[in-house]
Image (cartoon, rainbow, N blue to C red):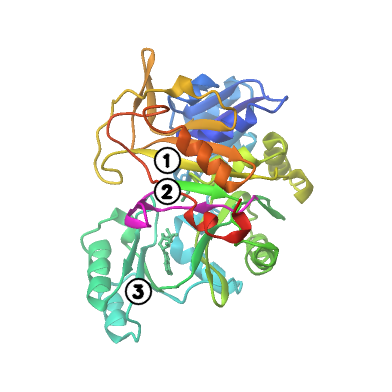
Amino acid sequence: MNILIIGGGGREHAIGWKLNQSPQVNTIYFAPGNGGTSQIGKNIDLTEIGDLVTFAKNNDIGLTVVGPEVPLAQGIVDTFHRHGLRIFGPSKMAARLETSKAWAVEFMQRHQIPCPESYIFSDVEKAKEHIKDSSWSSFVIKADGLAAGKGVVLASSKVKATKAVESMMISKAFGDAGGKILIQEKLVGYEVSIIAVADGKTAVKMVPSQDHKRAYDGDRGPNTGGMGAYAPVGKADAAFLKSVDETILEPLMNGMREEGYPYVGAIYPGIMVTKNGPKVLEFNARFGDPETQPQLMLLESDLLEILEACVEGTLSSELVQFKSGATMCVILASKGYPGPYKTGSVIHGLDTISNLDIQIFHAGTRKVGDDIVTDGGRVLAVTSYGSTLQEARDHVYSAIGTDGVYFDEMEFRKDIAWQGLTNTRNKK
Ligand code: AMP
Ligand code: GLY
């Protein structure tokens, strides 16, 4: 079967790497892909949905897999379905779980899914008045629409909250995404990414993983797309996972079906585990990046069988099995990310990694002649397997630096998985 993967990040490279191990997969195409995906498949330079439909028809694509949220918001799944093409991902209406935070909160309220207390505003004066009259001293202000992971401001005072509202609604810091905003209670707890695959009726969880969103060690600095992740998460024990199924995933799948938008694809609730149990901070209608990299490295099962079961409506938990051990991924970023950075630096040492427990997934890279050069903020996702998290960590950091992979002005966090390593259940 030929496969088309939409996207060009580390997540898409990891999906392609895993699908490539399936005996049924022939050629994998990536639109647009990156310097790494061109080594396991063919990159195609198409972004228009109509062009992708034509490509899929002309190249005998048996399954298309959508990585990022933007094509979902544009309705790629609906268009492919209209042309009778199989595609893994939610419809445009179902993807509102991610594309409208206001819709998602109202959906959770309708279906008693635990989430922070939230207020929705389209009028700037009413939003400011709400903050002025509030008994809260800290707030979370969110732009309703897609803002590339940047539309959330944690405000520790009324003055800062008001500024965030003005910047979203008046200065349009996130464009139209901030036409409507949410004012949310600030929760305290620890975050876990629960990512599940869904076939319209059932959602089956992948191994729990934990992202590191802040740019610098010690969880300091600006929020990024994610600087590293590990799996499994020791703290996400069986009782916690059961409560996620019962309080989040089951009501979500039932609610979406009842409302007429059965959910097919990856569903990723960002969860804060509070002293009152797990609460949903937001939904993503896709796999995580970088969580996918360690998750797929730990996946025992054939990914093609899982994705096909999702689109055919035959998913079961037996199809989604993970190995024992642990995996983690460290993002090598361009200096300056998530702000401005330079591109075009040659990446050294990609051929020096022969340890099969280490995989280097490309994100912002591009092939120039015989070189692979940097071409984005998040450049590489160095990912490793170990029988313990400590071993996975030792592998991953041994592959980074002048004895391994490096480029000019490379930056990365040195403390990925610190929470897992201080949790006794994950210790060697
Ligand atoms: P989101 O994009 O909504 O997941 O938000 C990005 C990050 O902001 C999350 O990963 C959390 O670290 C933080 N965050 C979002 N909502 C809340 C909240 N209600 N309380 C505390 N932290 C939050
Ligand atoms: N790792 C965060 C995300 O995929 O949105």
Mark 2 CB near ligand 2 (8 Å cut): yes
Element assignment for label 1: strand
Quadrant of the rendered image containing residue 364:
top left
Seen in the picture, residue 14 relative to 269 is either above or below; the reply is above
* Magenta segment boundaries in residue numbering: 206-224
Seen in the picture, residue 307 relative to 238 is either above or below; the reply is above
Q: Which mark is residue 239?
A: none
What residue is pinned by disc 3? Answer: 139
Residue 242 image offset from top left, x and y in percent: 70, 65
Q: Decide: marks 3, 1 in contact (CB < 8 A)?
A: no
Element assignment for label 2: loop
Nearest to the observer: residue 43 or residue 424: 424
What residue is pinned by disc 2? Answer: 226
Extreme residue toward the front, this view = 428
Q: Amino acid at mark 1?
A: Ile
Q: Amino acid at mark 3?
A: Phe
Element assignment for label 3: strand
